[in-house]
Image: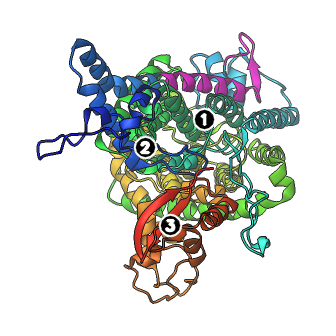
Amino acid sequence: MAQSHPTPTERTSLLRDDDISSAVSKDEQQLMAASVVGERLPYNDYTTIDWMHDLVKDSYRYRSIHSKKGLRYRAVAAFDSCSGWIAVAIIGSITACVAFVVDVAEATVSDWKLGYCTTNPFLSQEACCAGKTPLLPSSDLAEQCDTFRAWSDKYWASFALYVAWALAFGIVSSGATMLTKRALPTVTARNGDKLDNDTSSHPVASGKVMYMAAGSGIPEIKTILSGFVIPNFLDLKVLLVKAFGSIFAVATGMCLGKEGPFVHISTCVGSLVCSLFPKYKDNGRKMREMLSAACASGLSVAFGAPIGGVLFSYEEISTYFPRKVLWRAFLCSLFASVIMKHLNPNGTGKLVLFETNYGTSYRASHYVIFAILGIAGGLFGGIFCKANFSWSRWFRQFPLIKNHPVLEVGLVVLATALLQFPNPLTRDPGDIILKKLLVDCRNEESAASFVCRNEARTDDGWYYIGWLVHGLITKLVLTIVTFGTKVPSGVIIPALDAGAFFGRLIGQCITSVSPGIFAMVGAAAFLAGVSRMTISLGVIMFELTGELEYIIPHMIAILIAKWTADAISSDGVYDLAQTVLGHPFLDNDHALKLVQAYGTSTKHTAGTSVSNNADANPALVEILIPPARTMNEITVEVPPSNTVPKAILEEKLSQLHARGLMDAGLVLVQDGMLQGYLAGMY
């Protein structure tokens, strides 16, 4: 029997005391019967959260907690207000600890391809040779450091062992990634469903297969933060496999980095930590606010760039980023950086990874060089995006490669090892390569490095130039074929390496300043062309190198690189990765561009909208209406009697069921007016 309520007046509260909670969490189930807020259907793969429902739900929860009187309830309300800050502090601290383990382990495992430390085999080459500069090539360190011993003094034996270790590491990393294989749930047609006479036009939907720990994870995180749900992507198992796989993937020497996986790891940590708080566990909208903040700590520990990490989350990943998320991302990044600095995985005691001090300033004439670096970075970025997209759509569709991802990893590792070992500049992992190329040869500590020794030579300089060209081409080609393999991998470090090679090569023609300056700017330009980052990248490069003097060159190169790359390919690498992987993404800017451009291209094809006229007004809402078949299947015409036959509803739901739509429903229309929405439940 319905509960009676007094007649409302202008002083009546909008929310009754017995309607304060939205009755979805266990703590609020007792209020569910009286709540006017309906319960959301369970989320499943590629369904979206209900942003409005979660907003109203959180409002009810907040009113329930903060409207009660008494000391105990005030303490509960205070904890509720502080819970977000507590959570991000824990997230940043745990992320830093995980990153520390990965960094130290990766450095050690990578050096096993070259030799081992006689005093402690679990020490990296740099840690074993305490006091030696990491900028020296491997052979020089092995000769000057008695405690680090190469596997063999013979070139071909060392070459063979290098390739063998790399293949072993690649198989281990890819094999671990296979453990996270998941078939996303989907709806398939039931045996009793009879949609029409021609059942062949309705193919049976099949679950999509994903390797949760493969790749950088950034495209999937962007999908999740835009409102979609990918089950199991942020589980503890995925976190552990991602960290373990990243160690061995980077150790192979492939053209990949661990910076993207760190973002995925930090998001997993954020999801696990926030699941301990009912405030976030039971609310998809609030959870995504915390995941946006967690992303900042991932890049913060990867580059030692706390501010750059916050801007990266805002600019590149997040769709919904209100002001309070900015503050919490700042705190999360701060805690991650503080913990990482004191854990000191690099042994320098500093947060800056590639600290440089060129001691000279650029001239006005150098602006032209910076612009050229920007153009080159944009060309590389645009070509890379198109080439990698084409490579993924062609090579990875072969049944042998598609059904055996470990085989593809093995082939890429083999090609990488064979091409990179002969070159002293490409033999090490990507971060060590970047250190070598950013070196300032006027520093006495770096004078004995391979780069500085060759740049100081007055004879046979083409030998060194040849290695730079070889390194540039190798990085360009291998990065195209590597990105997208089924191992934890990122594209940030390879892009920086390629840009540093090109910049160092250009710097050989300019003697007025250190070539390392152009390597640094070139690295930023190439990464801007690939990822299309702008503000966050400029800040990251400053924090990465500690060179505030070169902010303006970075800005010039980054902007020109972005403009050039956009002229070639409108989408960055992460957007194209979403397309290749088939992930949906809610992007308001992209939708607006489609509406604005409708009917302006001669390549427009009809059939994507009810309006088949290419000259239609692009501002009309009808352009956003789905095709006629879809509209017919989801629309129920309600007769004047307001009674819809059961057979019609069953037929409509069966049609949705056959198309594999997990979160669809039926639109109720009467005389052209929307009457309601009937949610489908499977």
Q: Nearer the viewer, residue 182 or 326?
A: 182
Q: Is residue 7 magenta?
A: no
What residue would you read off at disc 1? 432
Q: Nearer the viewer, residue 321 or 306?
A: 321
Q: Is residue 115 magenta?
A: yes
The part of the chain drawn in magenta is 94-123
- As measured in the structure, the alpha-carbon distance from the residue carrying label 3 to the one carrying label 1 is 72 Å
Q: Secondary structure at mark 1?
A: helix
Residue type pointed to by label 3: Thr
What residue would you read off at disc 3? 643
Q: Secondary structure at mark 3?
A: loop
Q: Is residue 674 left or right of residue 492?
A: left
In this view of the protein, can residue 292 be seen by the observer?
yes
**Which numbered circle lies on residue 512?**
none
Q: Nearer the viewer, residue 398 or 493?
A: 398
User: Mark 2 or mark 3: which is in front?
Assistant: 3
